[in-house]
Image (spheres, rainbow, N blue to C red):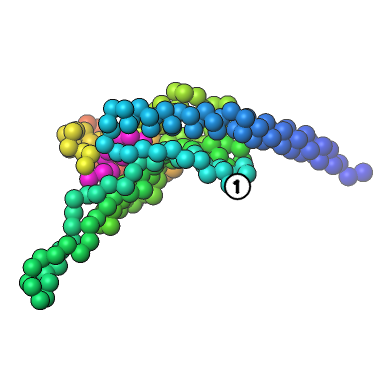
Amino acid sequence: MTNLTFIKKEKTKLDINRQELLNDRELWGSSTKQMIHSYFQQVCKTAKEVEYFFRLGSSINDIDLNEETIQLSAGVNKTGVFVRERNPETRELEIKEAFFEKGCCLVASFGQDGKISFMVSPYESQRHEWSDDYIMLYPPMRPEKVSEKVLRKSVKKFMFYARFTSAWGTRADSLSFSVIMFYWLLLLDIRNQRKLRRKLIEVGYDWSKLVGAGVIGYFVALLTK
C-alpha cells in the first residue's frame, strides 16, 4: 500500500499555521492596530506642543480587511526654491513654479500573512529624489511583538529620516555625522542586510577591507553594486 502518512503531517502543520494566522488577525484587530494609532496620535500631539517644524498627522487605512495600514505622515513643506522665467513683454523675472517636498512617512503595514512591517519613506521634491522609495526598519513581525519600545524606536528613526531628507533638516549635524547616520539607516533596511550578507559571502569575508574610515564606504559600495 502506498505510504501517504506525510499527508497527515502536512494537515497538522497547516492547521497550526492557520490557527496562528487567525490569532494574529484577531490580536491586530482587537488591540495592536489601536495601540499603534494611539501612539502615533500622541507623537503628533507632542510634536505640536513643542512646535516641531514638520506638521505630523496620523491616519488609518482599513478599507481592505486584513490588509491595512497605519501611517504617521510629515506634512508638505515649501523648499524655498522657485522657478523664474523672464516675461517676454516686460522683461521682468516672474515666478512660474514653487517647489515643495512631500511624501515622508512612517507606515505600519499589516499584511495578509498576519505580520506587520514598519517602513519609512523620505521627503522628495520636484528636483530631489532618493534611490530607495522606502526603508524597512525590521523584519515583518507578529502583532504580539509590537511594543512601545518598537514604536518609540520606529518613530525616532522616522524623525531622523524626515530631518535628513528634508531641505530644512541637515544643518544641525556635521556633514560626516549625517552621512554616517544616513547610511546606518540604510544598513538597517532588512533588504540591504540580506544583500550585504550575500556580498560578504561572495568576497569570502575579507574583513581586512573593513578597516578604519573605510567601513562605511565599503558597506555602501557593496549595497550599491
Q: Residue at (48%, 29%) from the top-left corner?
A: 38
Name the residue nearer the viewer: 69 or 96: 96
Residue 15 at x, y percent in the picture = 76, 35
Instruction: Looking at this view, name the residue that lies furthest to the bottom.
Output: 89
Q: Secondary structure at mark 1?
A: loop
Quarter of the image for the N terminus: give it.
top right
The reply to whether residue 180 is in sight is yes
Left or right for 68, reference 193: right
Q: Residue at (69%, 35%) from the top-left corner?
A: 22
Residue 51 at x, y percent in the picture = 27, 31
Left or right for 82, reference 29: left
Query: Which quadrant holds residue 67?
Result: top right
Instruction: Looking at this view, name the residue that lies furthest to the left.
Output: 91
Using a 10 Å C-alpha cutoff, classify the residue at mark 1 as few (fewer than 14 neighbours), some (14 to 19) or many (20 or more).
few
Residue 166: within the magenta?
Answer: yes
- Judging by the rendered image, the residue that carries numbered circle 1 is 64
Residue 70 at x, y percent in the picture = 49, 39
Count of numbered marks = 1
Residue 118: within the magenta?
Answer: no
The reply to whether residue 223 is in sight is no
Query: Which quadrant holds residue 127?
Result: bottom left
Query: Which quadrant holds residue 49?
Result: top left
- Give the magenta range: 158-167
Q: Residue at (21%, 42%) from the top-left corner?
A: 168
Residue kind at label 1, given as amino acid type? Asp
